[in-house]
Amino acid sequence: MKNTAPIDIILADSNPLVLSALSELIDRDPRLSLVATAATAEGFLGTFMRVPVQVAVIDWNIPVLGGAKLIEILRDQEQAPRIVVYAEDTGDLPRLAMTAGAAAFAARSSDAETLLETCIDVAAGKMVFPFIDVRNLQSDPIQMLSRKERAMLAALSKGLTNRELSRELEITVNTVKFHLSNLYEKLGVKNRAQAIAFFYSSRLAIESEDRSGIPR
């Protein structure tokens, strides 16, 4: 990566020993630039809002929000970093991290170089996970949607235009287009009509009706 600016990174882990060890590891790698560390999800968010970065390495159990909730919040940010979940490779955790929206999963049991290479790959736009049966991921695409995307899908079902979606969701038209593109990809559809059809065949329609008081 000669003549390329270092990749900006934030570390978030409640274990001070882990933060110290990872900080030293990253500082020694000229390809990476450690911007900040945080011991809580709230601390991470406060830092990220001031100084956006390309990659974030987070502990899945980061207090108080936890990794899944932190990723969900970040997915609604226009300059969201690519997330590497750094945790024990136990049970279904890699799949849960992918479903939440992480770009990679690095096991704490792996060697240090693996984590560094994972960060490099993620910054280049790659996804890095151990073997996961993707059939389980595809069983419920709704789980792949952020809160903003769920709200957009519900609004889309009303037949709103991009400009009307912009006003209803209080975001720019360009941001609407960005979210729609991600929405179509996650649902495996090609256009608005297919997305609306998916909405009315999913539990989202039921949830929306329950909140509005409209009988099914």
Image (cartoon, grey):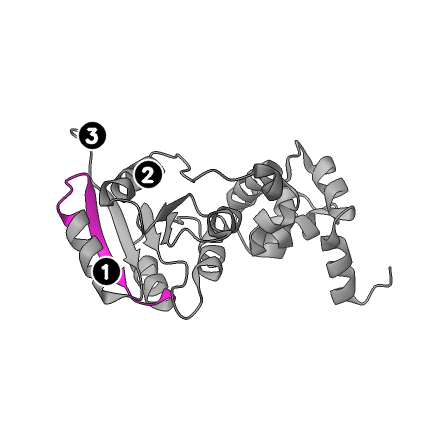
Number of other residues with Cα within 10 Å of mark 3, as a class: few under 14, some 14 to 19, many 20 or more: few
Left or right placement of residue 172 versus residue 62 in this view:
right
For marks 3 and 1, the one nearer the N-term is: 3
Residue 172 vs residue 131, the one in the foreground: 131
Left or right placement of residue 93 versus residue 7 in this view:
right
Residue at the bottom extreme of this rendering: 64
Estimate the x, y position of residue 142 in percent, counting from the top left: 64, 49
**Relative to residue 46, is residue 27 depicted above or below?**
above
Position of the C terminus, as image quadrant, is bottom right
Left or right placement of residue 170 versus residue 39 in this view:
right
Estimate the spatial distance between the alpha carbons at disc 3 and disc 2, rounded to whole Å: 12 Å
Q: Secondary structure at mark 3?
A: loop
Estimate the x, y position of residue 182 in percent, counting from the top left: 55, 40
**Disc marking residue 123:** 2
User: Tag 3: residue type?
Assistant: Met
Estimate the x, y position of residue 98 in percent, counting from the top left: 49, 46
Residue at the top extreme of this rendering: 2
- Which stretch did the figure color magenta? 27-41
**Relative to residue 145, is residue 43 depicted above or below?**
below
Residue 29 vs residue 166, the one in the foreground: 29
- Residue receiving disc 1: 19
User: Tag 2: residue type?
Assistant: Ala
